[in-house]
Image: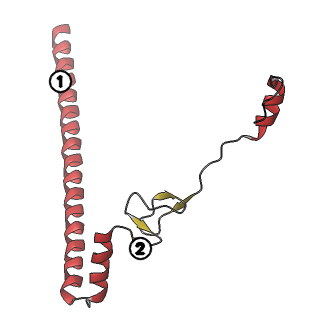
Amino acid sequence: MAVPKKRTGHSAQGSRRANWKATKPETTKCPNCGATVLAHTVCTECGTYKGQPVKLADKAAAAATAKKPAKKTSAKKTTKKAEETKVEETKVEETKAEETKVEETKVEETKAEETAEVKEEAKAEEKTEE
């Protein structure tokens, strides 16, 4: 085996290593869930690769649903679920609106009380001056 006669200098070593640069890995967006994924790898969020499930259990489930014709009840269930989520969202928005109204009325009441107290103090001062 060849052995160098002398040690390599710092500048020669540095100029040789000048092209050792780190590169950013290539990333893409998952077509299924939209998460950022390394290129040519399985999505860590949803477990798919090129739109296909990777796990054997997921493959079996996808194949089973592909073979069976879609039932009308499943469409109704999805619409019911969508309606339920819309109802829940509107309820949340209504409660938030009610909370803000309650807070506004409390602020108005405290302001009214403060102005009433200031007026009473002013009247008391006028009476003491007379």
89 on left or right of 50: left
Identify residue for label 2.
Answer: 52
Residue 71 is situated, as x and y percent measured from the top left of the image, at: 22, 89
2 on left or right of 59: right
Residue 87 placement: quadrant: bottom left
**Residue at x 24%, y 72% (from the top left corner):** 82
Q: Amino acid at mark 2?
A: Gln
| Relative to 60, residue 106 above or below | above
**Residue at x 62%, y 48% (from the top left corner):** 24
Query: Which residue is more in the foreground, 38 or 14?
Result: 14
In which quadrant will I find the N terminus?
Answer: top right
| Relative to 7, residue 83 above or below | below
| Relative to 81, residue 47 above or below | above
Q: Amino acid at mark 1?
A: Glu
Residue 129 placement: quadrant: top left
Model colouring: secondary structure
Q: Determine crowd level at label 2: few under 14, some 14-19, many 20+ residues with C-alpha closer than 10 A.
A: some
In which quadrant will I find the C terminus?
Answer: top left
**Residue at x 45%, y 59% (from the top left corner):** 35
Q: Determine crowd level at label 1: few under 14, some 14-19, many 20+ residues with C-alpha closer than 10 A.
A: few
Identify residue for label 1.
Answer: 117
Residue 107 is situated, as x and y percent measured from the top left of the image, at: 22, 37
Q: Earlier in the sequence, mark 2 or mark 1?
A: 2
Query: Which residue is more in the foreground, 86 or 35?
Result: 35
**Residue at x 18%, y 36% (from the top left corner):** 109
